[in-house]
Amino acid sequence: MAVKGILEGLATTLGMMFERPVTIAYPEVKRPVRPRFRGRHELKRYANGLEKCIGCALCAAACPADAIFVEAAENTDEVRFSPGERYARTYEINYLRCIFCGYCEDACPTEAIVLESQYELSYTDRRTAILGREQLLVPVPPGGQPTPQRVAPHSFDRAIPDMKDPE
């Protein structure tokens, strides 16, 4: 009776030796992420280069882990970062606290914060795990201008210019 169990175990082991391995050789081979995967945060821009974040801090209020800190400042015609009245002067995400729930993405009224597909997040010390606005902002799209921009006086008072997404 015990011999039968041993033979069944050996048959299972021998059968598994001829199947393809389930593991992959990471980091040489990287698996594609699933469509609904939530990875590293990115702060998006409009096609003209202005930042989508208006410094409202709704993302920080929605974060259950208290991982986001936003400090807003006023936009002026000489120094304009976003199309709104305010912009996020300080925007920090503490990845040691973040649970990647996506509530910040859901709460954002301008779709400025998006959890993208980058999953390689490793840090050697605690300070590098706190990413600031400069590290989170996506590059300026082709044809856009970097922020801060100088705009014509009162050009943002009535109608926002063409703010189409680069996608």
Image: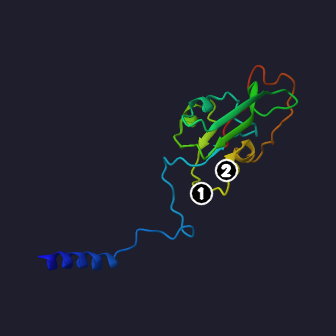
Q: How many marks?
A: 2
Instruction: Name the N-terminal-most of marks 2 and 1.
Output: 1
Left or right: 143, with 108 as reference point: right
Q: Residue 140 in the image: x percent, y percent?
A: 75, 46
3D distance between C-alphas at marks 2 and 1: 16 Å
Residue matched to label 1: 120
Identity of the residue drawn at 78% across and 45% down: 143
| Quadrant of the image occupied by residue 100 | top right
- Secondary-structure class at tag 2: loop
Q: Residue 73 in the image: x percent, y percent?
A: 78, 28
Q: Residue 93 in the image: x percent, y percent?
A: 65, 41
| Quadrant of the image occupied by residue 87 | top right
| Residue 66 visible in the shown view | yes
Residue 123 versus residue 27: which sits nearer the camera?
123
Q: Circle 1: is it few (<14), some (14-19), or many (20+) Cα within 10 Å?
A: few
- The amino acid type, in three-letter code, at marker 2 is Arg
| Residue 167 visible in the shown view | no
In the depicted structure, whether residue 94 falls above or below residue 4: above
Left or right: 96, with 133 as reference point: left
Identity of the residue drawn at 75% across and 27% down: 86
- Secondary-structure class at tag 1: loop
Residue 138 versus residue 134: which sits nearer the camera?
134
Residue matched to label 2: 126
Q: Residue 101 in the image: x percent, y percent?
A: 51, 40
Which one is closest to the eye, mark 2 or mark 1? 2
- Please state, as top left, top right, bottom left or bottom right, where the N terminus lies in the image: bottom left
- The amino acid type, in three-letter code, at marker 1 is Glu
Residue 32 shows which numbered tag?
none
Left or right: 80, with 13 as reference point: right
